[in-house]
Amino acid sequence: MSNQENKQMNKKIKKSHICLFGSLLVIIGISILAANHIKEIKKQLFSDMKIQIDNNISDEVIEDIPEVEEKKDTVPETQPKEEKKINYGKYLGVLEIPKIGLKRGFYGFDSKYNNVEYNVTLVGGSTMPDVENGNLILMAHSGDAYISFFAYLYKLKIGDMAYVTYNSVKYKYQIVNIYNIPKTGQATITRNMNKTCLTLITCTKDSDTEQTIYILERV
């Protein structure tokens, strides 16, 4: 092969190397741009996801609860004017009975929604589950109406379980007695005074003259 041919061959090889190197640079540049673009897309997606999650965070029980205005404790003029806000839109506790698919919150005595026409109702004389040998008494309507939260209590039997969540603690109860009483506006509760109890009261199924009382003991 002559010198002239060698020079032409080397020139072609150099040219091909330059083209190859240039192609590699273009590919690398495109890859960097694509990676940055994908990174921005991911960042935006995760940002949108975080906003969606944050907007759905709630420490409320999921129910159709009417909005309740906040009240403020009054503070004497001699003390610092630090106001303690009370949100009356939050439940005091939650009653759960898995067997009948019931999960419903109840309010405290100071809420206007502690009423059988709105909700499961906390009965006067009740004590909270953390009071030893106390008795938490709840009542609600039975029947077919929207507010008949105790409509399926009649399906419960001795030995069935119920749960009350109060102050972030879940208490477990077991039915030990079920009995009927005349519907007179007053109820006689028969229970073991040495046990911490939960009492549920509602109208007796298919009766216009009786109420049924369910006695549960904490276990």
Image: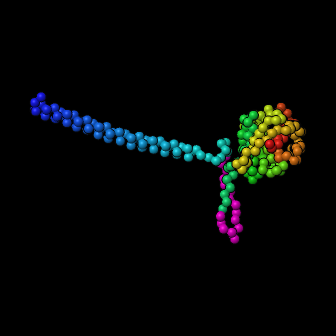
| Position of the N terminus by quadrant | top left
Location of residue 219 in the rendering, given as x and y in whole percent from the top left corner: 80, 42
Q: Is residue 173 visible?
A: yes
* In this rendering, position of residue 25 left or right of residue 81: left
Q: Residue furthest bottom?
A: 78
Q: Residue at x 88, y 45 (%)?
A: 192
Location of residue 29 in the rendering, given as x and y in whole percent from the top left corner: 32, 41
Q: Residue furthest front?
A: 1
* In this rendering, position of residue 15 left or right of residue 73: left
Q: Residue furthest top?
A: 1
Foreground residue among 76 and 44:
44
Q: Residue at x 87, y 47 (%)?
A: 194
Q: Tally the marks.
A: 0
Q: Residue at x 78, y 48 (%)?
A: 129
Q: Is residue 124 visible?
A: no
In the depicted structure, whether residue 84 falls above or below residue 113: below
* In this rendering, position of residue 36 left or right of residue 144: left
* Magenta stretch encompasses residue 2: no
Location of residue 133 in the rendering, given as x and y in whole percent from the top left corner: 84, 49
Q: Main secondary structure of the magenta part?
A: loop
* Magenta stretch encompasses residue 73: yes
The magenta segment: 66-82
Q: Residue at x 10, y 33 (%)?
A: 3
